[in-house]
Image: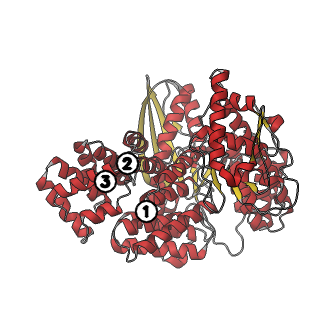
Amino acid sequence: MTLAGTMRQDGVQRGPAVSPALRLRLMGPMAIDDSLGRVSLPRTRKSRAILAVLALATPRPVLRMCLTALLWSQRGKEQARASLRQAVHELQDVLGSSWGRLLHAERHHLSLHGPGLAIDAIALHTASPRDNDIVRQFQNPLLEDLVGLDPAFDHWLTEERGRMNRAALIWGETMLAEQADPAVGLQLAEQLLSIDRGHEGIWRAAIRCHLERGDFRAARLAYERCRAARAEQGHPALSPETEELLARIGPPGSAAATPMPDETPSVLLRGAPLLSPRRSAVRLGVLPLRLVDPNHPAHADGLALGLAEELTTSLARFRWISCVSGTSLTAISGEAATRVLPWDGVDADFMLDGSIQRGGQKVRILMRIVDMQSGGAVAWARRFDRDGTDTLALQDELAAEIVAQVEPALLMTAGERDRGRSAPTLSPHELVLQAIPAMYRMEREAFHSAGRMLEQALAADPNQASAHAWFAYWHLFLVGQGWASDPDLATRRASELSDRAVTLDPGDARALTLAGHVRSYLHKRPREAIALHDRAIALNPNLALAWAFSGLALSYLGQHDDALIRARQASRMSPSDPHSFLFDNALMMPHLMLGDYEKAADFGRRAVELNPGFSASYRIYLSALGHLGRRREAVTVRARLLLLEPDITIARAVERSPLTVPEDLARFAEGLRRAGLP
């Protein structure tokens, strides 16, 4: 079912220009605003959907029977018509006397049009080709919060999103063609690629921009990212036009591919110097797994190659990681992929390799991260055992678990590796990486040092989304630990930084989930946070931190059973994660609120052991002990909490708690009272 025949073609409201007054936002979560606060969204989601459909069709009418077929496809005709009439009445009430004239209800059709109506989703029809902000708004999915209303509506929404994306990409390509500044062109290309990561024409434009700047290494990296993105979409071969650009880039080590004159050579094997000041991502090589299974070579070989490609694709979703696949490494090194160290001549900071072995119905995978700047030292290693013979199912399951554990291990390793280097020798990206482990140690001096590094990174590169996101997170900890001299100022700063991070890169899943946690924890707006967390999970389902934070946001709303599902997913994905103390908090809170104080105390005990400096763990843990009546253990935990926060009281703990349900706050406070907190 489509409404192609009713969709607006020119998007222009004829007549004299009128200043927009009623604004409808359809990209992302739906919103409506008339600048005077007189209009809010309809209460029911189907009434919102009708408003959205009419807005997309404006000024043309939409048949009533089309609307009932879209939203009540599984009901009888009379019942569907009655439901539509009720929804129309709700829309008329919402629009009121001020804007009711825009909704035209006829016997057989409905329409929405008139002076003063502005709709973001049709802005492409009237915008100037030089309006760079137009593409940015299309990075959010159309009607993000209206999925699941009806199978027919979901099908229509999928088609409309595809149409919107195609229109935005065509518009963006026009803008790219007219863009004379390669730096601005690169920024625009990244925005467009967040809409369609596999758009080869936009990748070519990005490669050309790098070549115009003389940055051949970045051009080669863009080429590799293009190939990985296209392969993910089922297009392993690139077009002749793209392959011609590779000839201009030249092979690694050629004159064309050498660093720019003012650039320090990047990681060279057999004696690695400092990272390039221009490096904006950790370069990770992913090799096909080595086979140590002579009894099942066919199965193992298929799993080994497929798993390496799946790992490359999944790890490439993390903005701070630049992946080179095993097939590329083999071509670059000129050696067989089954060799133990096929790495000579490969420009990489880390290598991810491993082995695969089958025994009967069992599969054993050994994975390791090798630090190329430390002479090939093993920085991380894990074993993964599985049952089963379904290669594709095994591949998906293993890739998800491996990626969820590799990424945080790599994040902490990359940060710790440069601890001895002074700030002037570090790029903005490296400053951020070094700040992360220092921040998580929760030692006051190291924590403030991390804040200074993040501030320096922002000063050096004001447009780095990750620096904004991590600095927002730093301010959240500053408030949560009770270390902020002005908590209100720190809260406002966290909000500004997190919003800026999302604006700079709406496709960065970590930035989205960190921004969501700021909104739920500091601003007590968990509903907004859940939308950000869900978007982060959709962009990168292997980001365990997003599952944990979304679980916390659900718990803050009082949805504790759903919160446990999310928190358990985070722990299951990455059981040895550096953020495990946060995962335990995400499990502790809903167990406490559901009255399972034993489990809450168990997770609390583990959380404070993993990170003794994180004060939020002690507050929830102490409340659980109070409900259990464990006075002796409570005395110890209370003493440690008071060392971290000498002025903490029940009133302050409740005031700072992000819980929004009064009964939950009362339960939390009662536990603290029984545990003897002042």
Say what amino acid the circle numbered 1 marks: Leu
First in residue order: circle 2 vs circle 1: 1
Q: Nearer the viewer, mark 2 or mark 1?
A: 1
Say what amino acid the circle numbered 2 marks: Ser
Q: Nearer the viewer, mark 3 or mark 2?
A: 3
Write down the residue under mark 1. 522
Nearer to us in this view, 234 or 579: 579
Q: Are marks 2 and 1 in contact (CB under 8 Å)?
A: no
Could you tell me if residue 483 is visible in this image?
yes
Write down the residue under mark 3. 665
Q: How many angstroms separate mark 1 from mark 3 (CA)?
A: 16 Å
Q: How many angstroms separate mark 2 from mark 1 (CA)?
A: 27 Å
Q: Are marks 1 and 3 in contact (CB under 8 Å)?
A: no
Write down the residue under mark 2. 576
Q: Are marks 3 and 2 in contact (CB under 8 Å)?
A: no
As drawn, is 432 to the left or to the right of 210?
Answer: left
As drawn, is 535 to the left or to the right of 168?
Answer: left
* Residue 323, position as x, y percentages in the image: 61, 51
Q: How many angstroms separate mark 3 from mark 2 (CA)?
A: 31 Å
For the N terminus, the image quarter is top right
* Residue 55, position as x, y percentages in the image: 74, 46
